[in-house]
Amino acid sequence: MLTQTVDARRYVAPYRSGVGTASGVGTALQSVKKSAGVFGGKEKAFKPNEELFSEGESADYVYKILRGAVRSYKSLGEGRRKIEAFRLRGDVFGLDPGKEREFCAEAIDEVCVLVARRRTTVGTAADSEAIQELCEATARELQRVQQHALLLAMSARQRMACFLIEMSQRFGEPNLVELPMSRQDIADYLGLSIETVSRTFAKFAANGIVSLPTSRHVVLRDPDALQQMRE
Amino acid sequence: MLTQTVDARRYVAPYRSGVGTASGVGTALQSVKKSAGVFGGKEKAFKPNEELFSEGESADYVYKILRGAVRSYKSLGEGRRKIEAFRLRGDVFGLDPGKEREFCAEAIDEVCVLVARRRTTVGTAADSEAIQELCEATARELQRVQQHALLLAMSARQRMACFLIEMSQRFGEPNLVELPMSRQDIADYLGLSIETVSRTFAKFAANGIVSLPTSRHVVLRDPDALQQMRE
DNA sequence: CGCCTAATTGAGAAGTATCAACAGAAGTGG
DNA sequence: CCACTTCTGTTGATACTTCTCAATTAGGCG
């Protein structure tokens, strides 16, 4: 819930070093192909909480995550924010349809990405392959956000269940999730308070649905129960 | 909120006559141009609650609304649903990126649309204009859904304020909104219960922010107050 | 008018946020 | 290695919001 009151403890000034350096990268022509896994570009590392790019900035580069996790969010005044997406290893992102970034992107942990300049031909009829590529990426994004909008209309328990299933699917390992993000990140992603996230984890654990060896490690003991919660 | 309990009173079997007839329409090549307002195709009318198309159906046609309003939604078991969008006069919709409909579309009131067959060339490099058009439509949809996801993470009061502002903007008339949809529709769009929608209207009216000549007519007496609520 | 549906309103229950205190982990410097 | 600090996460108490159920009112239409 995005409430009116401000929690001053939450505000963290971002590092803001990544963009400047990234701007010097990728002057050569790169091929950006998500499905095939072909992705040219220079490698670049980011420290936790370091910005890859910020809202309003021009959307010149595309990123593919080699290691780590990134949060994409919008700031909503004094420490409040809505995380729009988590980008994990293998994800390609930054192909915003417009000229400007709609969201800011920040490293969650130690992140290593490939950075590629976007094809400048987008918008002309010349490179229809690039256009189609952009189109497909946008369509996938659309579906993802529609799914997320559905999630946000559900109860806290259901949101958490969806979140855990999503993460377990995206990390590949069936029933073990190693969360790179904090409880606060999860809360801002699901539109809940940090306490509700924590309590819901505790409730899941108490019911034997998950176990929590550490706060960042979640073992899905009863994935079916989580699945059933989603309806 | 999408709750577990079922309200049997809500279930309404849809008319289900539109799709069959629409299938015979639009065999000629049509030009689909949203921005310019050029839109070929045959005119077709729908009665309230009549389906334009349903979830899972193949996405062969594009629609432009000449009159009336359409709700696009996903069913979620026994009468529950999430309305994903309201389509109003002038809107072009149905350009789903995929082959199949992700959502169902239903007339809210007496609706008149133009129906055009989608260009079959989408997917080949031949008609790059069509691809780009689809791309732009998808990008606009993406932005709209992102906005909606933001809304769904807010309080009931804020959601309602956003809704009223959105409607007033889309209808053109600055401070007068004539709602084509029921309270239930609004509730399913905002992820709230019908009672909360009703009560929030009443509270806005009590505070002089709006007045309600009838339940379907909303006069925005203090649009700035609504704007401020959004943050 | 009588029926039917939509909308409103009230009362109580449930869910979630907020505030505050505490516990645990990680980092820092001695 | 240990004290100290800091940050993150957990837990409890309480208030507030929203949902649910039920009753009532208002509107539309035969």
Image (tube, coloured by chain):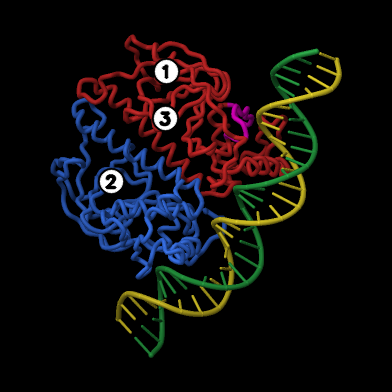
Chain colours: A red, B blue, C green, D yellow
Q: Determine the residue located farthest toward the top in the rendered image.
A: A28
What residue range appears in magenta? A173-185
- In the depicted view, which residue is nearer to us: A65 or A98? A98
Q: Residue at x 63, y 27 (%)?
A: A178
Place residue A7 in its image quadrant.
Answer: top right
From the top left corner, tell me how far across and down residue B39 is, in percent. Answer: 16, 45
Q: Which residue is mark 3?
A: A55
Q: Amino acid at mark 2?
A: Phe
**Chain where mark 2 sits:** B
Q: Which of label 2 and label 3 is nearer to you?
A: 3
Q: Which mark is residue B38?
A: none
The kind of secondary structure element at disc 3 is: loop
Q: Which residue is mark 2?
A: B93
Q: Amino acid at mark 1?
A: Gly
Q: Which residue is mark 1?
A: A37
Q: Which of label 1 and label 2 is nearer to you?
A: 2
Q: Residue at x 53, y 25 (%)?
A: A14
Establish if B176 lies above or below B137.
below
Establish if B40 lies above or below A84.
below
Q: CA distance from mark 1 to mark 2?
A: 33 Å
- In the depicted view, which residue is nearer to us: B221 or D20? B221
